Image: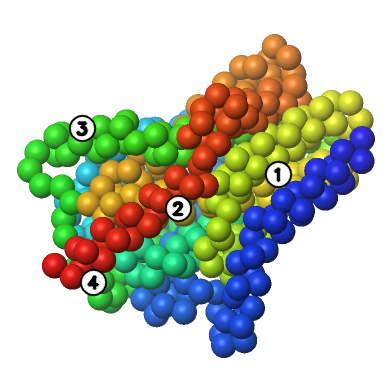
Amino acid sequence: MTFIGLAILAFGVVFMAVAIGPEFRRRRRGFAKSFLPPALQYPKYRAYWLGMLAAVSGYQMFRVGQLWLIYLITDSPWFLGYAGVANALPGMFFNLFGGVFADKLDKRLLIVCTQATTASLIFLLAILTLFDVVQPWHILAVAFLAGAVEAFDTPARQAIYPHLIDRKVMMSAVALNSSIWSGMRIVAPAIAGLVIAGANVETSFFVAGAGFLTMAAVMYGIRVPHIEPGATGNPARNLLEGLDYIRTNFLFIFLIGMTFFNSFFGMAYVSLMPVIAKDALSLGPGAYGILLSAGGVGSLLVTVVFGFAGNPQYKGLLIIGGAVLFGISLVAFGLTAELIGSYGLAIALLFIMGLFTSTYMISIQSSLQMMVPDGMRGRVMGFYGMTYSLMPLGGMQASAVATVVGAPVAIAIGGMAVSTFAVILVLANGKVRGLEGLLRQSERGNILRRRATKTT
C-alpha cells in the first residue's frame, strides 16, 4: 500500500514538471535580478499582500479563540458546529450581493469599511469576554455578522488586486494570496493557542482585531488606479446580469463547477478527520493536529512554487490533471486508512492531497481572474467565492454518508466524485478537451479589451 502513495507522488512530480517547467526555465534570468516573486515586485500589491497577511492571521486567531470560548462556556460539541454554520451561512446568501457592490462601489473604500467593521465586532466580543458577561448567543451573533461582512469583503478584495499588478504575473499573485491562507492555517492557530495559554482568550481577540485594522489602514493608504464602475442602477438587475454572464460562458461554468466539487465533496474530508484519527488510526489529539497540518504544508509548498513561477502555459493540464490526482489521492487516503491504518502513510497522502488541490485551485482562480472583464469581476468572483461557503454543507453530507458506510469510505467517495467530474467532462465535452486553447484565447481577448479601454 505504501507503493500507492509513492506512485502518486512520483506521477505528480512529473506532472508538475511538465506543466510549469517551461515557465521556470523562461524566468531563470529573472530570479537573478530579484529574489522576490514576480507579483511582489509591484509595490502596491506588496503592500496589499502584507495587509492581507495581517488580516488572515487575525481571522485564523479569531476562529480559534471563538471555538475555544464557546466550548469553554457550553461544554458542548454541538455549539462548535453551530459556530461554524453561523459563520458560513451568510456567505451562501450574501456573496452574490457582495459581488454586485464590489462592481458598483469604490473597491478600496469598501475593503476599508468591511475590515474595520470586522475588527469592531471582534473587539466587542473581546470586551464582553473581558468583563465576563459573554454568552453563547453573543459568540454566534458575532460569527454570523462577521460572516455577513466577509461576504462583501471577499469579492472586493478579489476584484481589486488584479489592478495592482500586470496581468502577466496573475498566477503569481493568486498563488501568493493562497500562500497566506495555507501558511497561516499552520502558524496562526499555534500562536492563538500560545496567547490563550499565556494570557487569556480576550487577548487573542484583541490581537485578531488588530490584524483586521492593519488591513484597513493599508488599504486606506494605497492609491489604486481609477476603476470604472461595472454596475449601475438596480442592484437586483446587476445581480441577474452577472448570473446571466456566467450562465452563457461555458468556461466560467466549468471552472466554478470544479470549485464546487472541490468544496462540497473534496474538502469534506476535513470534517471527518477526527473520526479517521481516533477510530481508524487510533491516534490522540496531538497526532490529529499533525495530520491536519500535513495537508497545509503541501498546499503551502505549491503556493510558493507558483508564486515564483509567473504564468505557466499549461493551465488546462494543471486544472484537469490536478483535480484527477487530488481525487485519486483522496480515494487512496480513505481506503488505506480503512485497510492498513498507517499513520505515516496517512501523513504522506495528506501532504500529496495538499499539493494537488492547491495546484488546480490556484490554476482555476488565476484563469478566472485573467478572463473576467473588469466590469464583471466582482460579481463573477462573488459567485466563485460562494462555493467556498458550501464547505460546511459538504461536511454535513460527508458525515451523513459516513454514518452508513463509515468515514474512510465516505472520504473515498468524495475523492471519486472530484475525479469523475473532471474525467467525464473531458470525455464528453470537446470544449474541455480544448480547454488550453480556450483559456489562452479568452485571456488574450480580455487583455486586448483592457488595453483598448485604457487607450480610449
Could you say whether the residue bearing mark 1 is in a helix, strand or loop?
Answer: helix
Query: Are circles 4 and 1 on residues that touch, CB within 8 Å?
Result: no
Coordinates of residue 333 in the picture (x, y in percent): 78, 35
Coordinates of residue 378 in the picture (x, y in percent): 28, 49
Query: Are circles 4 and 2 on residues that touch, CB within 8 Å?
Result: no
Badge 4 local density, few (<14 within 10 Å), some, or many (20+)?
few
Tell me which numbered mark, 4 or 3, is placed earlier along the sequence.
4
Q: Specify the amino acid type for callout 1.
A: Met
Give the numbered dot on residue 353. 1
Instruction: Give how far apart the Cα atoms at labels 4 and 3 are.
Output: 28 Å
| Closer to viewer: mark 4 or mark 2 | 2
Q: Specify the amino acid type for callout 3.
A: Leu
| Closer to viewer: mark 1 or mark 3 | 3
Identify the residue shown where x is 34% and y is 36%: 249
Give the numbered dot on residue 440. 2
Tell me which numbered mark, 2 or 3, is placed earlier along the sequence.
3
Query: Are circles 2 and 3 on residues that touch, CB within 8 Å?
Result: no
Query: Considering only vertical position in the picture, is 305 above or below 89?
Result: below
According to the image, what is the colour scheme of the structure? Answer: rainbow
Instruction: Give how far apart the Cα atoms at labels 1 and 3 are.
Output: 36 Å
Tell me which numbered mark, 4 or 1, is placed earlier along the sequence.
4
Q: Would you say 448 lies left or right of 168 here?
A: left
Would you say residue 437 is visible in this rendering? yes
Q: Specify the amino acid type for callout 2.
A: Arg
Could you say whether the residue bearing mark 3 is in a helix, strand or loop?
Answer: helix
Tell me which numbered mark, 1 or 2, is placed earlier along the sequence.
1
